[in-house]
Amino acid sequence: MKRAFFQALVLFALLGITWLFVVLRFCSDEARPVEPPPPVEETLPPVLDDDLPDEGLEEPPMDDAVPEPGLESADAASQKALRTDAGRAVLAAADALAESPSQAHAAGILRDLRAGLEALPPGEAAAAIMAFMETGRDARTRLPFAVGRGGRLETAPSLRVFLLDELGSLDASAAARIAERGFEETTSADEYALHLRNFAWGSDLPSVERIARVRERAIELTQRSSWREAPTDGFAEAYDALVYTNATEVTQRLARDTDRSLPGNIRRPSNLALDRLVIAAPEETLPQILEDMEGMTDQPYTRAGYFARADLRDPAHREIVESYLLSDAVGSAERAYFFDLFPNHNFHHSRNLLSENQYPSHEEIVERLRGALERTHEWLEDEHFAAYTDDIARARQRLGETLGETPEP
């Protein structure tokens, strides 16, 4: 009984001491406030804004504001444009891209920037883009130069290329004006490619003059030695301007640029552009290839495919093809490949900066097949083709089966 009383007394004393300590701790004038924990560092920078309310935040007067990054080299009008919502969004994206840890994050920055610009008045967005271009700033994205539908880019390798793509849609006329100067000043083949597209879209020149200017500038791009030494994806995509302007005068150079020793971003676009020029203007392109057969000595099957695109119903086309087949520069393997292929109706589908893919109708294809079949009958009776009767007979069999007919022997 006494022991229990003693234990209770000790417990009461301990409680009293604890209460006294707490009172003294929180009532003391010398007590220090508890410091807040340090802020958590963000692993990724914000893209456009952090969506925090700005009530109670006072901005300095515009004239006294400290210039933001990128404003130093801009004139007064550009500085004003870069202080708008659109300008701040572009500058924020440039800063974010500079610290972007991955392609995926960079793609997200551009996606958010596009959405932000499209939500603003087009004039404000276009002015901000032009002002940013004046600063000379850029930021790499590590994304490819990838063309999507309607000539717009799906991804861009740099912020400037991305903004040129946006400007072409927001203000085609302004984009064309920037392109005029860009043709002379830019050191980027990717930007030059967008200048070609934007000029074609927005120039107020008469159609003939506008196309002639695009053709001239496109030829200049594909011949610039510094860009040919390290051809970018944008450099390759710019070859489409040769197709768009029907630049058949570069046929022989394109044929030589299909050489396997050249970089892929020269060889592949040259091949595609040449093929599409042959489709569009066989009378102008095929004779030039025939005149310079040495230009494709290491591409015999590709060359055969070009000549197999001719329409053998047309007397001019027949003359070109027969000159090709009887040329000493055509080997037996190349000639046999031609007979196995013609008429060539294999078409590339591509997304292009300017030109549109052209395909013949089903009825047109059938008529071309009939014309080819008829021509093989004439070749079998022509002594000039006596050495190739086996190849011709094989072609007749194929064409007849395709048409559902049995050709006469």
Image (tube, grey):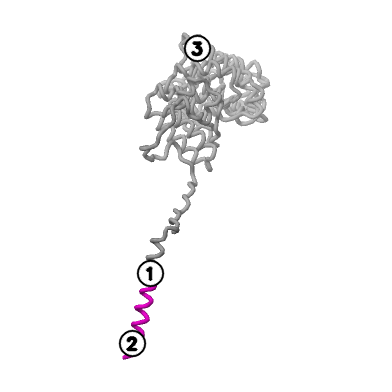
Give the foreground label among 3 and 1: 1
Marks 2/3: CA distance?
A: 107 Å
Residue 301 location in percent, x, y? 60, 28
Element assignment for label 3: helix
- Please state which of residues 202 and 150 is positioned toward the viewer in this rendering: 202
Whether the magenta-drawn stretch holds residue 202 is answered as no
- Please state which of residues 120 and 347 is positioned toward the viewer in this rendering: 120
Identify the mark nearer the N-term, 2 or 3. 2
Question: As drawn, which residue projects farthest toward the left?
Answer: 1
Residue 215 location in percent, x, y? 55, 15
Residue 224 location in percent, x, y? 64, 21
- Please state which of residues 248 and 127 is positioned toward the viewer in this rendering: 127
Residue at the (57%, 16%) spot, across then down: 217
Quadrant location of the N terminus in the rendered image: bottom left
Residue bounds of the magenta highlight: 1-20
Give neighbour class at mark 2: few <14, some 14-19, many 20+ (Cα, 10 Å): few
Marks 2/1: CA distance?
A: 25 Å
Q: Is residue 334 left or right of residue 358?
A: right
Amino acid type of the residue tagged 2 in the rendering:
Ala
- Prevailing secondary structure of the magenta residues: helix
The residue that mark 3 highlights is: 210
Residue 4 circle label: 2
Element assignment for label 1: helix
The residue that mark 1 highlights is: 20
